[in-house]
Image (cartoon, rainbow, N blue to C red):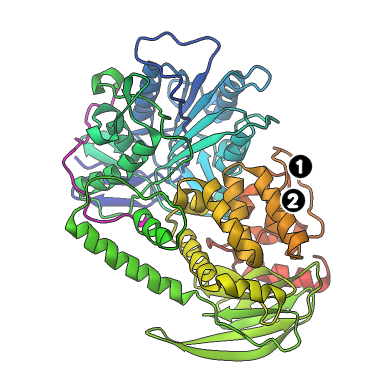
Amino acid sequence: MLAALRSDALPCCWSWGIVIVRRRTFLGGTAVFLSGFPWAQGFARPEPRTHAAIVIGVQDTSGLPSLFSAIPQAKMFSNLLTHEGYDVRLHIDQGISGDERRNLLHAIKTSVSTIADPTTLTLTQLVIYFTGHGLWSPQEGDVWLLPNALSDSDQAIHVRSLEQLAYTSGIRNVVIVSDACRSPANDYGQQLIKGSGLLPTNDRNSRVDIDWFYSSRWAKPAYEVEVAAQKFESIFSKAMLNAFTDPPDWILSDIDGRSVIPNEMLKEFLYSETERLTVALGLYEDVSPFISTASSANVYIAGPYSLDTIMNETDTMIETDTGWLQRTPSDQQVFAQVFAQTGLPVTTTKSLPRTDEYEANLEQRIHRLQEQQQKITPMRDLDLGAASAGIAIYNGLVADVAGSTEVHSLGRRREGRDGEGVYEVSIFGAEAAETGETAILSFANGSGCVLALLRGYIAHVFADESGVDMIAYEPIPGSDAHYEFQAQGDRLRDLRSLLTLALRNGVFGIDNSLAEASGDAESFADQIRYLKFSDPTLGIYAAYAYAQAGIQEEVREILEIQTRGNLIARIFDNVLLAQPTRAEGAELLAGVVPFCPMLRNGWEFLRVKGVGLPEAVNRAGPYLRNSVWTSFDQPGIEILMDALRSGEI
């Protein structure tokens, strides 16, 4: 009954007689359909084409274990969408020639160019579904691997570029379903895999809503299990297929005269169903998905169909238990509850009826989360003397500091906190120009980070063994910005620390944290806009929220307000995100600080924004760490410090 381990290149888990293979490389997409265009089984596809799908299933990526559920489940999803009336283009690595396997990207891009040609576009909705291997790297973010990806770095799909190009496509709704791992690359060679953004460049300036269905959170694996002799299933794809073949009544809605599963209810079902499946399988692993739905309540992928209608080769299915009750809150539910307590408009999860055990666990988890917030709350009223900018470093011994201006030590300060012991902070001062300065910090463990020195602000740096968790900018006591900050100080600190913990824990994914927290990146970022005027950190977070929601005019407004209205230097991240989306070029940004993105997520945007980095920064790139804020291992920090001190950067 147990299959042999297929490769020692990827970790596998064994549990209760089940073989579990981590789907090492992944990310995916599926597009959603507007309620005004429901397609029931038996309806003829309308002309011109309005709904289409790209379905990709990769069983064998050379050099990685085979994923035996990928092709059968891709075929089942393709059948579902075909019955629903989509123009489906199915691409699998089976029944094709060796040359076609080596260049599967060409066939996929040919399909995409046919159905999403900007000059003849009639689509209102597009679904992109990927099942196979995937990986995450600090420089590129999520990448889906095609069969020849480990030999040809272009034979992959770069998910951040796919997202940003989708926002320019003019297609009203795009749903991306990704059943692939998001775990970190194993080696330098895997980090070099870049891939394609898949969609063509388009200049259409119309609103596009993207619904994301990731099988796992940031830096986490996805799982395939052997449920019977030589019968394999992906947990996430199985949960999604369960929604359409055996849906509980609570996720169904009547839209335009037919019963369908709206995407927002599909989201709630998948959170609970993946947990139920792991319990049924005896799998003691964190398999929580990451899902963000930006579309309206009447948008759906499909209605229910019988299993026989879409069945192909997978005839052993894990049964659905519609009477199962949720007893443990998901991380998303815990964070949503605490976000709501800040007074921000968040979408709380509905899911299944909750038990008393669930409520007790929720209260306990909220208490632990609030304790973690206290650990990354800056000390108040640090004295910088005559310095116009400062750095306060927590939780780590500083080995070295380099700056584009002289940075000098102002000693240390100790502070006791209830239940948390004594905190010690190392304080540094500098004279910063109005255009800002750059500083590089090296910690005792060899790692380090890059940050902007902003005139009139102290950068509070919180680091741990993985890198920098948060850089919190607060005005120097006595400055004009300080008086404005004080009026909202406690709320700013609570919100900033909560967002940082959500990013660090991968709860909302580094990619879509604000969107997932609110259910709508636009509405959530709107709330942050009010608070960000005296807080550059929240300004950066809000810019990423808008960029990831495709709302470029708001990204540019943040840059305008902070640089001209608040006289804050041009921060690299804000300038990067304000660039137009394009699929080529590597232009250096002028007049920005520091010389690279401060938030690690920004590295994923460089290619699709056509932005390059100084050569020394490119040399340090392979040493990026898996952290919320840009952090490097020791060799990378040494390269950057040498370059800064020599004047190369």
Distance between mark 1 and mark 2 Cα atoms: 8 Å
Q: Amino acid at mark 1?
A: Gly
Q: Horizontal and vertical percent for residue 506? A: 44, 57
Magenta includes 498? no
> In percent of the image, x 76 and y 87: which residue is there?
386
Relative placement, left or right, of 372 versus 14 is right
Relative placement, left or right, of 575 versus 548 is right
Q: Which mark is residue 563?
A: none
Against 615, residue 232 (above or below) is above
Against 420, residue 534 (above or below) is above
Give, as a single range, the part of the protein colored magenta. 311-331
> In percent of the image, x 35 and y 59: which residue is there?
334
Q: Horizontal and vertical percent for residue 239? A: 30, 37
Judging depth in this view, the residue of 495 and 154 nearest the camera is: 495
> Pointer 1: residues within 10 angstroms few (<14), some, or many (20+)?
few
Q: Amino acid at mark 2?
A: Gly
SS class of the residue under badge 2? loop
Q: Which mark is residue 612?
A: 2
Q: Which residue is mark 1?
A: 585
